[in-house]
């Protein structure tokens, strides 16, 4: 297992929690640039890429995914203890992800509706960002993360400087690229103003509104945006609030704005029908 | 020797504008391209008229117009086929002369050695087609900012070196336009090579430079008829009339800079998302950051200059935090730079009135409205002509009532005076004269319907005689003289008044104004100190009227007797432990100069800065109108430039010994 490269190479791990693996795929999608990365970093543990495993300790550990079950909640604490720089990657790890929409719902009802044997399912009633459980040193936002931001973070780690990660709005990225504002020119509701840039304004450049997958930017004036959408443009408040109920819904101040406008996901408060298998078993138990 | 008159010079050929049909634009495009230029002009893309490279007249927005409002832009079809019948879209020449991202240097770092290789661009020769007068004004501003000083932005200079401009005079306008106010349009006056005015007839083209002449000559267009010329002149004039004059530019800088604490900054910050769209679409905003892109080894570095924005969180950040952490601070920074401080730095406002920041603000904040609300044009204060404005002439007033305030201080009510006295303002004074005694400057401690009230401490022979006047006695008066406490500035704000002894007299008219219209002000606090309890003036007001009117009154004395249970000590101790926030509070201070120095320092420590603290000064005066020279202090005459000054106005002469 001993590496032939210089011993100074930082030891890196990539682990996942509750997630779709898309951010890990962004790492693998670096393709030829991945070779540079492996020259500079020793990748100890990355089960998406290799069956060779290691328990660390890690100089840098990338965490994909939200904390969604008790096992993950324990594991993240253990991993933190073995890690120098813990970096969360993607909307799930940094904000709780799209799955955090269930945080507004009835967890038990969802579980009973989806799983045939709900008693075998151990899950937390909320999907949480990693930073709710352990200290995080850096985060890469987005669903999925941006490969250039990933490389910038790696370059910064390799040289010991502060990474230059965008803290401005998506609007500025839009304008720099000469894209026409979809909100002003087409009346498309767009979260770009309150969303942290770094994505290169992909969505507005293709004519659709930003849906906030990079999450709220520092000091995001969500109330101001919602007031404009409702008072000035006549959108229904709950509908406006629902714009925020996406990939980073659980991140503040999006979360509070969703609550304040009644923009919680449709059906989250409704009791769900049980899954057929669970219904059959419940009926059997009732008959017994 | 007989001089023969020189033969008359031949009149220059009357060039004048030429006429081109709309279809005649393609040959112009071809000429520009044949000159090796990329033509950057208007075209329809993504729901707007944007600037992009144009190779064919078919790309021009023929028959397109737009509908603009704060936060709203829509393309609309025109009923005619004009090529330039639209107003400005989101993009400006800035994207080509000052691109959003340019490499400025390549650098290396290896084994302790570093190298830097500045990147010099090799920009294409550009011809801008269809840009407007306000955009040329913006380019000229960039010329001053980026290459008009001792240091030159080499990237900008290279890109700007050979730009040819085919401009269009505006025959259309949007509700967001205000070039007329900023002096930048709609007429084309300078900075272009060819000027086009488009009317229902077609295009009137006129050359303004030799390069333009050459192009015009090559186009072989006929001379425009007087009727065509008249229509063009009329259409541009009509545009000016339509736009009107939406921003009151004269004096705007001073009015705006006088309002660093206006509550509107916080109100607009509730609407502002700080997204930075305004600075990005602004054709003059030039703030940038340098980002460094490194390879994984950190050895090879590309330094890029990118557009930044004063609305970004990191723009004013240093280790420890941001100097402008609140959105209101950032909005104020932007607006005051555009409309005020830019002028000090670069000689003109930083705004050309193109209105892009208004249209492209995603929440529709209108700079014109904000400027008008924060820095309104006030009708000029009526000049109150003082009565008897020469040192020898006095109006005669009659003492109607006398009241002994303390052992040495007396208040005289004087009536039957010229009504001009009643028009005086709080803080002004009068020159008071009893024949045989020297004239004295006395603060006016109240204005009444037909006169005024003077409160006088008998400190010398003349003041002691005044204190001894009886009802029915007459006295000579000139005034009201000097500057006043700035009540308009503190309207709607919190006010702290700190005073000692007889210093309460010139502040009583302020407190009268507060009592008369309590809603006009925020919280009002009076901190007043006297030598002993018996030296407190205006006991009725201090103990009854003012507290009842919601003024917080706190008193202290230097020496107490058995009848005093209040605080003892210097007046600043009264607010040592106060909980009020000074960051938006204003202060009026009057007392002995040493006391005012200590008070101003204590107020500054609580966050009330020099621009929000006013004092009233005392000096020897003979004339009271700036003629006798006695009261000079630095560059000021206390009688005519004061006696009320802000500490910012006094600068470091305040409290300096021997001035």
Image (cartoon, coloured by chain):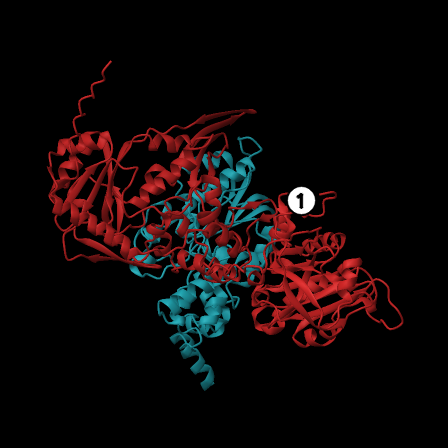
Chain colours: A cyan, B red
* Whole-percent x, y for residue B541 in the image: 71, 73
Give residue A198's position: percent from left, percent from top. Answer: 43, 48
Pointer 1 chain = B
Identity of the residue furthest to the right in this view: B562
- Residue B154, x across and y down, in percent: 41, 30
Where, quadrant-wise, is the N terminus of chain B in this rendering? top left
Near-viewer residue (B325 or B170): B170
In the image, B82 versus A216, the foreground residue is B82
Quarter of the picture containing the C terminus of chain B is: top right
Residue furthest to the top in view is B1
Is residue B556 something that shows in the picture? yes
Report which residue position mark 1 lands on.
B652
| B441 is higher (above) or lower (below) than B52 | below
**From this viewpoint, is residue A17 visible?**
no
Crowding around mark 1 (Cα neighbors within 10 Å: few <14, some 14 to 19, many 20+) is few
Q: Position of residue A185 (x, y in %)?
A: 30, 57
């Amino acid at each position: 297992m001993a590496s032939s490269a210089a011993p100074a190479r930082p030891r890196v791990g990539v682990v996942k929690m509750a997630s779709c693996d898309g951010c890990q795929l962004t790492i693998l999608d670096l393709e030829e640039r991945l070779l540079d990365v492996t020259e500079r970093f020793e990748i100890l543990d990355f089960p998406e890429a290799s069956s060779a495993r290691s328990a660390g300790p890690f100089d840098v550990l990338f965490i994909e995914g939200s904390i969604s079950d008790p096992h993950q909640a324990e594991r993240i604490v253990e991993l933190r203890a073995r890690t120098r720089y813990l970096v969360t990657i993607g909307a799930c790890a940094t904000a709780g992800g799209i799955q955090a929409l269930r945080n507004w719902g009835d967890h038990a009802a969802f579980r009973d509706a989806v799983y045939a044997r709900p008693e075998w399912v151990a899950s937390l009633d909320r999907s949480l960002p990693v930073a709710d459980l352990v200290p995080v040193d850096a985060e890469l936002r987005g669903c999925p993360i941006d490969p250039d931001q990933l490389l910038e973070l790696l370059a910064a780690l390799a040289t010991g400087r502060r990474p230059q990660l965008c803290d401005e709005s998506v609007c500025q990225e839009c304008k720099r690229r000469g894209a026409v504002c979809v909100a002003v020119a087409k009346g498309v509701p767009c979260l770009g103003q309150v969303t942290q840039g770094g994505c290169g304004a992909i969505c507005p450049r293709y004519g659709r509104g930003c849906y906030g997958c990079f999450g709220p930017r520092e000091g995001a004036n969500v109330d101001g945006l919602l007031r404009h959408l409702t008072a000035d443009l006549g959108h229904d408040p709950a509908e406006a609030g629902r714009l925020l109920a996406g990939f980073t819904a659980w991140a503040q101040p999006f979360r509070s704005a969703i609550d304040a406008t009644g923009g919680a996901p449709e059906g989250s408060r409704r009791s769900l029908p049980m899954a057929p298998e669970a219904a059959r078993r419940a009926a059997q138990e009732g008959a017994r | 020797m007989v001089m023969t008159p020189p033969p008359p010079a031949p009149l220059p050929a009357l060039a004048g504008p030429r006429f081109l049909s709309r279809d005649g634009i393609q040959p112009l495009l071809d000429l520009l391209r044949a000159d090796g230029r990329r033509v950057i002009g208007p075209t329809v893309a993504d729901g707007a008229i944007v600037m992009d490279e144009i190779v064919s007249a078919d790309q021009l927005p023929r028959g397109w117009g737009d509908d603009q409002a704060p936060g709203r832009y829509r393309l609309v079809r025109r009923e005619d086929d004009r090529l330039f019948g639209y107003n400005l879209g989101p993009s400006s020449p800035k994207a080509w002369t000052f691109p959003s991202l340019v490499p400025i240097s390549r650098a290396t770092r290896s084994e302790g050695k570093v190298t830097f290789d500045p990147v010099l661009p090799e920009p294409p020769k550009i011809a801008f087609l269809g840009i407007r007068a306000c955009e040329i004004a913006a380019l000229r501003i960039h010329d001053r900012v980026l290459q008009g000083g001792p240091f030159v932005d080499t990237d900008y200079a290279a890109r700007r070196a050979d730009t040819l401009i085919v401009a269009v005079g505006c025959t259309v306008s949007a509700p967001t336009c205000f070039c007329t106010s900023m002096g930048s349009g709609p007429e084309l006056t300078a900075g272009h090579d060819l000027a086009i005015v488009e009317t229902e007839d077609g295009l009137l083209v006129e050359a303004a430079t030799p390069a333009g002449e050459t192009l015009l000559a090559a186009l072989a267009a006929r001379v425009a008829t007087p009727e065509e010329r008249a229509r063009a002149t009329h259409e541009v004039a009509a545009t000016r009339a339509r736009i009107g004059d939406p921003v009151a530019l004269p004096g705007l800088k001073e009015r705006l800079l006088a309002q660093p604490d206006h509550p509107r900054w916080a109100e607009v910050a509730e609407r502002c998302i700080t997204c930075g769209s305004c600075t990005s679409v602004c054709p003059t905003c030039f703030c940038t950051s340098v980002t460094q892109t490194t390879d994984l080894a950190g050895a090879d570095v590309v330094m890029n200059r990118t557009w930044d924005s004063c609305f970004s969180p990191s723009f004013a950040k240093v280790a420890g935090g941001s100097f402008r952490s609140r959105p209101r601070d950032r909005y104020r920074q932007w607006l005051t730079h555009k409309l005020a401080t830019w002028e000090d730095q670069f000689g003109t406002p930083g705004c050309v009135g193109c209105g892009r920041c208004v249209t492209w603000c995603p929440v529709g904040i209108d700079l014109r409205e904000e400027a008008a609300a924060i820095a309104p044009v006030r009708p000029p204060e009526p000049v109150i002509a003082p009565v008897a404005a020469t040192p020898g002439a006095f109006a005669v007033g009659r003492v109607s009532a006398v009241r002994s305030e303390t052992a040495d201080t007396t208040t005289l009510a004087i009536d039957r005076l010229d009504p001009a006295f009643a028009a005086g303002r709080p803080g002004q004074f009068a020159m008071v004269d009893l024949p045989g005694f020297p004239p004295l400057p006395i603060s006016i401690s109240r204005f009444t319907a037909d006169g005024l009230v003077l409160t006088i401490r008998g400190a010398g022979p003349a003041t002691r005689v005044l204190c001894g006047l009886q009802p029915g006695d007459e006295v000579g008066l000139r005034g009201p003289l000097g500057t006043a406490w700035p009540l308009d500035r503190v309207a709607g704000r919190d006010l702290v008044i700190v005073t000692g002894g007889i210093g309460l007299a010139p502040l009583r008219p302020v407190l009268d104004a507060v009592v008369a219209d309590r809603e006009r002000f925020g919280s009002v606090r009076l901190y007043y100190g006297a030598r002993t309890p018996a030296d407190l003036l205006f006991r009725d007001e201090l103990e009854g009227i003012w507290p009842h009117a919601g003024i917080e009154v706190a008193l202290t004395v230097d020496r107490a007797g058995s009848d005093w249970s209040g605080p003892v000590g210097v007046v600043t101790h009264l607010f040592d432990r106060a909980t009020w926030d000074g960051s938006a509070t204003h202060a009026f201070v009057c007392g002995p100069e040493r006391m005012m120095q200590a008070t101003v320092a204590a107020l500054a420590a609580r966050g009330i800065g020099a621009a929000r603290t006013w004092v009233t000064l005392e000096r020897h005066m003979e004339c009271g109108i700036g003629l006798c020279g006695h009261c000079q202090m630095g560059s000021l005459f206390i009688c005519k430039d004061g006696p009320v000054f802000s500490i910012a106005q006094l600068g470091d002469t305040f409290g300096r010994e021997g001035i």
